[in-house]
Image (cartoon, rainbow, N blue to C red):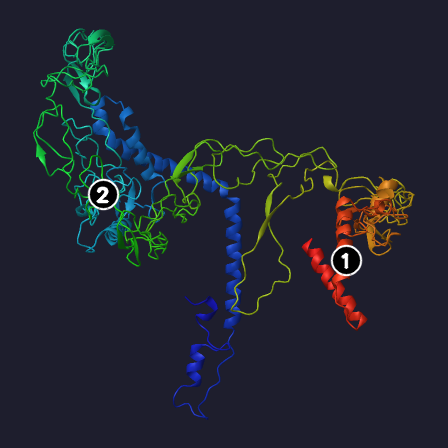
Amino acid sequence: MEPVWRQQGRGRGRSQEAQGARFRPGGGRGGRTEAPHSAAPLDKFEEIRKSNQAAAQRLVESHVSSSSSDDEDDDDRERQDGKRGQILASTFTTYTNQTGGDATGLVRTGQYLSDLFQSGALTCLICIASVKRTQQVWSCCSCFSLFHLPCIQKWAKDSVFLVSSVTDDDFGQKQHPWPCPKCRAEYPPSAKPNRYMCYCGKLQDPPADPWLVPHSCGSVCQKELKPTCGHTCLLLCHPGPCPPCPKMVSVACMCGKAKPLPRRCSNKAWSCQQQCGKLLPCRQHTCSQTCHTECRPCPRVSVQSCVCGRQKAERPCSSPQWNCQQVCGFPLPCGNHACEKVCHDGVCPPCPRSVSRTCPCGKTKSSLPCTEEVMPCGDTCDRRLSCLKHTCSMRCHRGSCETCRQEVEKECRCGKHRKLMPCHKEYLCDSKCPKTRSCQRHQCRRKCCPGNCPPCDQSCGRTLGCRNHKCPSVCHQGSCYPCPENVDVRCSCGSTVLVVPCGRERSTKPPRCKEPCRCPPSCHHPTREAHRCHPGPCAPCRQPCLLPLAGCSHTCPQACHDLVLVRSQQVGVQLAGPWEQPTEPAFVQKALPCPPCQVPIPTPVPCHRQGRFSCGRPCGRPLTCGNHTCSRECHLVTDGNKCEVCEEGCSKPRPPGCPHPCPRSCHRDDCPPCSQMIRQRCHCKISILYVECMILTAADDQTKVKLSSCNNQCPKELSCGHRCKQVCHPGECEDRCQQKVKLRCPCRRIKKELQCCVSAQCVVQCDDTCRDQQRRVSHVRTHLDTKHTWIDTPGHTHLNIHTHLDRHTHTY
């Protein structure tokens, strides 16, 4: 739609009629008519200005009359609550008639019904949106959750598609079940929702009747009750589970001794409190419990024999069969061996050696007495080895065959490599599987994978639709299941709670509360006006102000004006042109002063004009600084007419050592600490430091030394030639150098590390090893002097001698 100022005029102030007159056919140079000057733009701007003023006025009235709208909302709520009560009463009438008005069995079903009428309580967990009464829905038969029909159809289709793509070799040929998004109850493929049905399943596309439960057909439910008792549900078509059966039936007690009594069908099991007296399975004792359904095992103890009859012991009557764990030892029919079975009943088995036996390899049969062993036949064993490919090459032998050790060419599990290795060993290569696992997100990365990659074992971790939690399931394909968490949405006072699925708390309105508002007053009144709990800020206080007025004994009769919405003054905001719309006026809360007293008094002037007068002399009242007096002419001191402000500078003495003046004007209290920075050099005279004057003047001598240090290493050199290791410090450096230096013995074999300050007092002497080595060197030199070859050049002779000397020294 076009703006108001564009609906009629076009171009630069010309109307469509003026343009038509200007370019009308037949109107040549002589017949052209000039368009009259139009005032349409001014009229449009005036219209826009009036509409903006009206909008601002409506905004003010809406803020001021918020309390009255709350009252109207309360009336609407009462009407809606009455209508809701009538719908619930009509739904539960047939049930309460059977129970005599008892509604204890309707608590769970009633909660589902109340959620239907509560705004924002029902949410589709697939799309995280509210379920409205005009939308097509589907209800789960297990958890009774409501979902939008298009959402659950897409969910079922995607679930079957993902399962088929992962498990089926021939994709799409098998029929797979699909789960409920909340309780994960599985439904067969034939149960895919394709129609919008009521809760009881009798009516397709139920109409939206304001006097029925949403998505209900209005007829009796008639579903079979659970547990199955033969009766059907008596409620009108409803969401949630069916209530317990309210029918009255005549039922005997659990033991059957007492006469039948009328009982509620859902609670028909009852006890007559008589002793049971039935014979227990032990056939020795009777049941001593009161009337019940099935007797428990006998709790008593009796002396019972074991299975073989050798031992007797006290055992529970409920377990008469027991073994003594002794070997039978009874002679077998052969007369040579005894029974080796543990405690058993019946006849002992025949001797295992009396039947036809074979040699260890099984090729030769023999019928020897049970006292003789069958010897090996001497032939090749030929039994299959554990590899199931080769046979044993040993002679017929007792015991198990050895492990197959033949060298065969084996293919690895993934089929990429081949290698010669013993037959009994499995060949696994180091190649990692590059295929994607069933989640379609992570690689298999299993060594030598044969192709049947295992399911992904990593956590999904994707953000759920609620935007608050992450998926805790194992990594999977497709959409994650909805968030199972619930969030409490409370009213302002916290008395009324609405449980909504996680993620809906940001868009769900707070529930309606019938408790009184508990917000403390924001004005000077001790209490607020009584009103119900509500979201948002409370309405402005409408109680009389009643504050005492200044200058008289009367009180303010106006309405409370501690927090009044006042339109803010937008200065300098100009529109760029007629195409720009003005912004909405901003309002701020502000406390207004009480108006002047208008109570008439017996004088010719109003009360607020009567008061004291000026004498013309200097005021002389002490100023706020406490050091000077007011020099103004005699005046009355009020909130808007106070004494002058002292503009003199501060004349108080400064702390010792501070060269700066006080930055404040003349004042009564102590001067503030000096925050100006003092520029000075550090102890080593290299860095420039800035220290706050207050800290430097209040510090002691030790602290001043720390403040004057740049915290770097001292650049001065000690007498030994090393650099001082201390941090920037005053005075002379300590002539005790801590630098590590190396000292050697005269032959330079022994080496020690000492501090520089101690090295001048220590001398490293040669030990016995050094002296022994020196003797050997001198001996080698003496030996070489007798065997060396003289060379004409002295330098060459000296070089040759030293060369032999070094070799012999190295040999020694």
Residue 189 x/y as whole percent: 19, 47
Q: Measure how far apart labels 1 and 2 are at the Cα level.
A: 78 Å
Identify which amino acid the numbered label 1 is placed on: Arg
- Quadrant in which the N terminus is drawn: bottom left
Residue at 77 percent of width and 44 percent of height: 768
Question: What crowding class fits label 2: few (fewer than 14 Cα within 10 Å), some (14-19), or many (20 or more)?
Answer: some
Query: Sequence order check: which comes first, mark 1 or mark 2?
Result: 2
The nearer-to-camera label among 1 and 2 is: 1
Residue at 87 percent of width and 52 percent of height: 720
Q: Mark 1 points at which residue?
A: 781
Residue 139: image quadrant is: top left
Mark 2 secondary-structure assignment: loop
Mark 1 secondary-structure assignment: helix
Question: For this view, does 660 lie left or right of residue 29?
Answer: right
Question: For this view, does 749 lie left or right of residue 84?
Answer: right
Q: Can residue 103 be seen in this view?
A: no
Judging depth in this view, the residue of 417 and 642 nearest the camera is 417
Identify which amino acid the numbered label 2 is placed on: Ser
The correct choice, above or below, for 51 with respect to 330 in the image is below
Residue 530 x/y as whole percent: 51, 32
Tell me the number on the disc at residue 386. 2
Residue 193 x/y as whole percent: 21, 48
Judging depth in this view, the residue of 710 and 355 nearest the camera is 355
